[in-house]
Image (tube, rainbow, N blue to C red):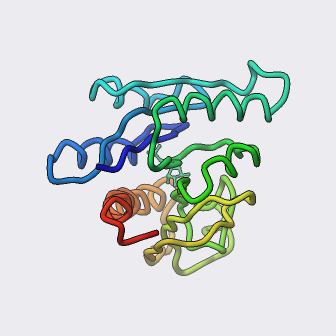
Amino acid sequence: MLSVVVLISGSGSNLLALLKAAENPLYPVKIVAVGSDKDAPGLEHAELFEIDTFVVQPERFSDRNQWGQALLANVLHHQPDLVVLAGFMKILPEGFVSALSGKLINTHPSLLPEFKGAHAVRDALQAGASKTGVTIHFVDAGVDTGPVIVQEELQIIPGESEAQLHERIKEIERALLVRTVENIALGKIK
Ligand code: GRF
C-alpha cells in the first residue's frame, strides 16, 4: 500500500478522484492526509472521507523558507511514500522540494514544457494553440520543469472558453492522476 499525502489549493476535484479510487480495496493506495496553503474548499472532500487535514498559510510566517519547513513537518508527520500536488498553487521552497526528492509529483493542465505556470489554460488559448493537455511530472526546484512521467493531449475546440477547456482538461487529468498514482504504487514508475 502506497501512503500518499495530497496538497491542494482549490476545489479538489483531482483529490476527490483519488479518494474515490482509494475506496476500492484493490486500489493499492491509501490517502493518509490532505494539506493546503489556505482554507481551500477541497478540504471538505477529505473531511467527508475522514482523512486528516492540515493548513499551513504562508502569511503566518516571516519568510517562505520557514513556511516550507512548517509545511514539510506536517507532511512528514504522516510518513508518506508519495506527495501529490493536485492543484496546489504556491511555489514550494527548494528545501521542501529537495527533502521529498523523487517522492513529489505534480499535475499540470498543459503539455509541458508548453505553458508553464498558474495560467496554463488561458495561455494556451491566447497563444492560439490547436491542442493542449495534461502533464504529470516529478517536481524539481524549477516551476513546472521536473521530469515528465506521463502526458495526455486533447484538441482545443475553436471558440471554447477558458472554463470549458479547463473542465475538459480536468476530466482527463483526474483519470490520468488516478492511473499514474496506481502505477507508482505498483512500481511501474520509479
Ligand atoms: C488542475 O487542473 C491542476 O492541474 C491545476 O489546477 C486544477 C486544480 O483542480 N493546477 P482541482 O482543485 O483538482 O479541481
Give the answer, above or below, for where 51 lies relative to 167: above
Seen as rendered, the residue at the extreme bottom is 130
Q: Nearer the viewer, residue 129 or 1?
A: 1
Q: Does residue 6 appear left or right of residue 180 in this picture? A: right
Kindly indicate the quadrant of the structure image that contains residue 69: top right
Percent position of residue 10, x then y: 51, 37
Residue ID at (16%, 47%): 24
How many labels, in total? 0
Q: Nearer the viewer, residue 131 or 51?
A: 51
Kindly indicate the quadrant of the structure image that contains residue 48: top left
Give the answer, above or below, for where 4 lies relative to 137: above
Seen as rendered, the residue at the extreme top is 60
Give the answer, above or below, for where 37 lies relative to 87: above
Kindly indicate the quadrant of the structure image that contains residue 67: top right
Percent position of residue 167, x then y: 42, 55
Percent position of residue 83, x then y: 50, 47
Give the answer, above or below, for where 79 lies relative to 165: above
Residue ID at (63%, 35%): 72
Residue ID at (49%, 74%): 158
Residue ID at (19%, 42%): 23
Q: Does residue 140 appear left or right of residue 61 in this picture? A: left
Percent position of residue 181, x then y: 37, 58
Seen as rendered, the residue at the extreme left is 25
Q: Nearer the viewer, residue 134 or 127?
A: 134
Q: Does residue 2 appear left or right of residue 74 in this picture? A: left
